[in-house]
Image (cartoon, rainbow, N blue to C red):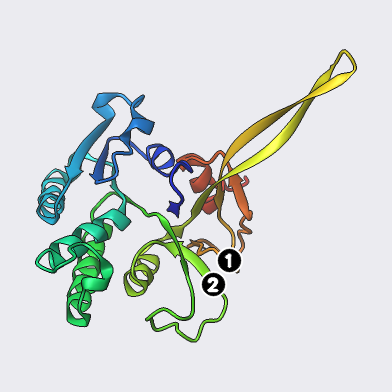
Amino acid sequence: MYGRSGTGKTTLAASWPKKLVLFDVNDKGTDSISDIHDDDIDIINVRSWDDFEAGYWYVYEKSKDYSTVIVDTVSQLQQILVYEMSKNKDKPGHWGTMTRQAWGDLTSKMKTWITYFRDLPMEVVFIAQDRVFSGDEESDDNHMIDPEVGPALSPSVAKHLNASAHVIVNTFIRRRIVKTKPIKGKSQKIEKIDYCLRVGPNPIYATKFRKPKSIILPSVLSNPDYDKIRSIMLPEKKE
């Protein structure tokens, strides 16, 4: 899942089956799930690539103890790798300091570890920030004219992550005005905030659902959680 900060990505991921293990990758977004009982979630703080690899092997060895692993966020994970691979440059940590060969090495490493996580014997949730891709970027899709919104990763890494995932959703906040009953001849207007997911096919936002062709997806899912997402993937059979 991907989206702007504050659109409910971590909270939604925390609705996945327990027990959870969450890789907090330089994000410090765990405040939004502080109400989850300590017995239901373990936090692995990732401040370096070594932390990330060590965390993976810990989860791999303890895989029977967990139902879900969350990487929050894979965008920050790539940024850690950018920093570590360019830290000997004059301007460490900036994408512009990376050579083409370094980008190739980074891409290969990111793809390999995304695949390692995807293949863990549990539910796997990758969280990313959002990014607008356009046709002038260096990618295999440079013929593309219309912009597309997807995970904030380099184009080739984003493509690999999208191909690896069973489900791709975009989180966003929808604000609407709700009118109350008239009071003294005047109606009060109250703003209601809905946390939403873009789910169905979209010409701009990257979305994906592996499902039977007979299932028609809604374009948007309001106040989503794990059970709602599973229900539209695997609807109950009518007797």
Q: Position of residue 32 (x, y in %)?
A: 38, 32
In the rendered structure, the answer to whether residue 141 lies left or right of residue 95 reads right
Residue farthest to the top? Answer: 184
Residue 147's mark? Answer: 2
Q: Which of the pair 183/89 is nearer the observer? A: 89
Point 63% across, 55% down: residue: 219
Which amino acid is tagged 1? Lys
Quarter of the image holding residue 9?
A: top left
Q: Residue 175 has which mark?
A: none
Q: Residues within 10 Å of mark 1 (few under 14, many from 20)?
A: few
In the displayed structure, 100 sits above or below 210; it is below
* Relative image position of residue 59 (x, y in whole percent): 16, 46
* SS label for mark 1: loop
Assign the C terminus to one quadrant of the image.
top right
Residue 228 percent coordinates (x, y): 53, 42
Q: Residue at x 61, y 35 (%)?
A: 193
Secondary element under disc 2, as helix, strand or loop, is loop
The amino acid type found where label 2 is placed reads: Pro
Classify 3 as above or below 115. above
Task: Please tell me which residue is depicted at 31% across the width and 51% down the height of the picture.
Answer: 73
* Residue lying furthest front: 90
Kindly tell me whether residue 119 is visible in this rendering: no
| Quadrant assignment, res 151 | bottom left
Q: Nearer the viewer, mark 1 or mark 2?
A: 2
Residue drawn at x 59%, y 64% as measured from the top left: 201
Camera-side residue: 132 or 234? 132
Which residue is identified by label 1?
A: 213
Labelled pair 1, 2 in contact (Cβ < 8 Å): no
How far apart are the two marked residues, 1 and 2, measured between alpha carbons? 27 Å
- Whichever of callouts 1 and 2 sits on the residue coming sooner in the sequence is 2
Residue 216 at x, y percent in the picture? 63, 59
